Structures are given as structure tokens and as C-alpha cells.
């Protein structure tokens, strides 16, 4: 192996420590405790783990969390009522509706119903639009984690060719929008590849920074990487041999200059960015009350 490891786990810990200081300071000056409401519908085991971990992270940095657990048979109207109640609750600053939702519920309708000022996932169209215009309120958690990982490891982004494999609304599309903006953490030349891309390897081999987020275990192999490139693996796939990313680590690490491990790469940062957004939401909403 020649690649240096981009250690997301220790970076996330460092950011949480910085955040904990900011939270204490915020509570002391405002007497408001930043609060996240997590809504979990049904009993998807992975979602239950994610929400439990997110709430534990909140506790570590001093953010209060509420859990709203709803049965799998919950109707869309019932969930919209819960969202409306949380929107109106001045003690709640961030709302997270864990995805996926049961099939009888239209996810888009629910995500659009969340008050954009409390939309700590940054999935609401208003927040997506703001990101594209370069005036974000919140940055979506996974793309923000990727950008922070690059910035704090001094990976040059300005002028770099970033190739993103995957065009999801949660990762690929917003990340492209963020990296192409002017200024710090931006100014990249971005190519977004997807399932219909012709000769994918010819494009990934041009990447100075290759971000892979397609949800296919070990899809990107060493021969698809330019020597010395920075490889960011967003994938988390549960397989018979355990957790693996979207990048075949062993072959990729021989070619890349820097690479994220799975687990311990992007994942811990994604969770931490949710906390950053919750504090941001608490700050903005509390300032509004004073206006
Ligand atoms: N399910 C998988 N990832 C996410 C996420 O980032 N936010 C929410 N709300 N649900 C998810």
C-alpha cells in the first residue's frame, strides 16, 4: 500500500470537540439548548442503528435530542401532522425524518413539509436551491463531510478535476454543486458520472479527486484510478465479508495518493455534520426570536 489514509474517525472526533465548546458557549449566552427531533417510522434495522448513533452523537456535544417513533403503518397524513407539530415547536431547532420511509408515504411530500429553517438534512428544495446558488443555509451532511475531509487534510480542491461517481440527490448532485462554487472548498472542475456514463474508467482515470457514491460494493478498482489521486469512498455496503465501500480498497490503495477507509472514513464525518447543522439552526432560529 502506498496511499496515505484520510482518517475520518479522528477528524470527526476533533470537530465534535470543537463543536462541544461552541454548544456550551451558545447555551451560556442564550439559555437555549440546541435540540434535534429525529422521526423514525417503522422498524428498519439499519435506520434504527443510524438514529441511535445520531442521538448518541448529539449527547456527546451537548445537543438535546428527541425521538419520535411511529408505527410502520403510519399514514402520510399522520406523518405530515407530526412534521407540522415539530415545525411549530419553538424548542425544536432541527428536524430529521429518517429515510427510507414505508412505501405508503411519499418521501418528497414529507421532506417538502419540513420548515426549511429546521431542515438539518438540507433535503428541502429551498435549501438545495440555496446550495446551487452558493448561499447555503445548511450543507447536506455527507457532501459536507467529504468537503471538510478534503479541506482539513489540505487536499487542493481549486482547479482540481473532481470526478463524482453517482448522481443521487443526497450525495452526488449536491456535492457537485458545492465543489463548483467560487471560493474556499470550491473552484473545482466537476464531472458527475452515473450508470449511463460511457467508458467510465476513462473518466475516473482523469480524476485528481475521485468520489465514489453509487452503493455497489468494491465497484471502483485500482486500474480506474490515476496514480497519486485522492480517493473518497462514500459507500457502506454490508456483505458476507463485512462492511466494504464502493472502492476495492486493496487495489486502490496501491495506486492512490490518499484514500478513505470504510469504515472510519466519510461515515463519522457525515454524522458530525448533522450536529453542525443543528447548532446552526438553533443559532438562526434563536436570533430570529430576538428580532
Ligand atoms: N437515510 C440514509 N441516510 C440518510 C440521511 O442522511 N438522512 C436521513 N434523514 N435519512 C437517511
Image: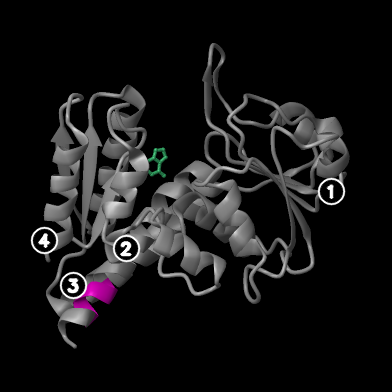
Quarter assignment of residue 197: top right
The boundaries of the magenta stretch are 283-287
* Residue ID at (37%, 44%): 108
Residue position for label 3 = 27
* Residue ID at (55%, 72%): 134
Question: Is residue 66 visible in the rendered structure shown here?
Answer: no
Q: The C terminus is located in which quarter?
A: bottom left
Residue 267 image position (x, y, % from top left): 49, 42
Above or below residue 69? Residue 117 is below
Above or below residue 134? Residue 214 is above
As drawn, the label of residue 116 is 2
Q: CA distance from mark 2 to mark 4?
A: 14 Å
CB of mark 4 within 8 Å of CB of mark 1?
no
* Residue ID at (17%, 30%): 74
Above or below residue 175? Residue 203 is above
Q: CA distance from mark 4 to mark 1?
A: 50 Å
In the structure shown, which secondary structural element does the residue marked by tag 2 occupy? helix
* Side (left or right) of 194 relative to 38: right
Q: Nearer the viewer, mark 2 or mark 1?
A: 2
Q: Nearer the viewer, mark 3 or mark 4?
A: 4
Q: Nearer the viewer, residue 287 or 13?
A: 287
Amino acid at each position: 500500500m502506498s496511499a496515505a489514509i484520510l482518517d475520518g474517525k479522528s477528524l470527526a472526533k476533533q470537530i465534535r470537540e470543537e463543536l462541544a465548546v461552541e454548544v456550551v458557549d451558545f447555551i451560556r449566552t442564550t439559555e437555549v439548548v440546541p435540540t434535534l427531533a429525529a422521526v423514525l417510522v417503522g422498524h428498519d434495522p439499519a435506520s434504527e442503528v443510524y438514529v441511535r448513533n445520531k442521538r448518541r452523537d448529539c449527547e456527546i456535544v451537548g445537543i438535546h435530542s428527541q425521538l419520535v417513533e411511529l408505527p410502520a403503518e403510519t399514514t402520510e397524513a399522520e406523518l405530515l401532522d407530526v412534521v407540522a407539530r415539530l415545525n411549530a415547536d419553538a424548542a425544536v431547532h432541527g428536524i430529521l425524518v429518517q429515510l427510507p420511509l414505508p412505501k405508503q408515504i411519499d418521501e418528497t411530500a414529507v421532506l417538502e413539509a419540513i420548515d426549511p429553517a429546521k431542515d438539518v438534512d438540507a433535503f428541502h428544495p429551498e435549501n438545495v436551491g440555496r446550495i446551487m446558488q452558493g448561499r447555503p443555509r445548511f450543507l447536506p451532511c455527507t457532501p459536507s463531510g467529504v468537503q471538510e475531509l478534503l479541506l482539513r487534510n489540505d487536499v487542493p480542491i481549486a482547479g482540481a478535476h473532481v470526478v463524482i461517481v453517482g448522481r443521487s440527490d443526497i450525495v452526488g448532485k449536491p456535492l457537485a454543486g458545492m465543489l463548483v462554487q467560487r471560493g474556499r472548498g470550491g473552484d473545482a472542475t466537476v464531472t458527475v458520472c452515473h450508470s449511463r456514463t460511457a467508458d467510465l474508467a476513462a473518466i475516473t482515470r482523469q480524476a485528481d479527486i475521485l468520489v465514489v457514491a453509487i452503493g455497489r460494493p468494491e465497484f471502483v478498482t485500482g486500474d480506474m484510478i490515476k496514480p497519486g489521486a485522492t480517493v473518497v469512498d462514500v459507500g457502506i455496503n454490508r456483505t458476507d465479508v463485512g462492511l466494504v465501500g464502493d472502492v476495492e480498497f486493496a487495489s486502490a490503495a496501491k495506486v492512490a495518493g490518499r484514500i478513505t477507509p470504510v469504515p472510519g472514513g466519510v461515515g463519522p464525518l457525515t454524522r458530525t455534520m448533522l450536529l453542525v447543522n443543528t447548532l446552526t439552526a438553533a443559532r438562526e432560529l434563536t436570533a430570529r426570536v430576538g428580532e
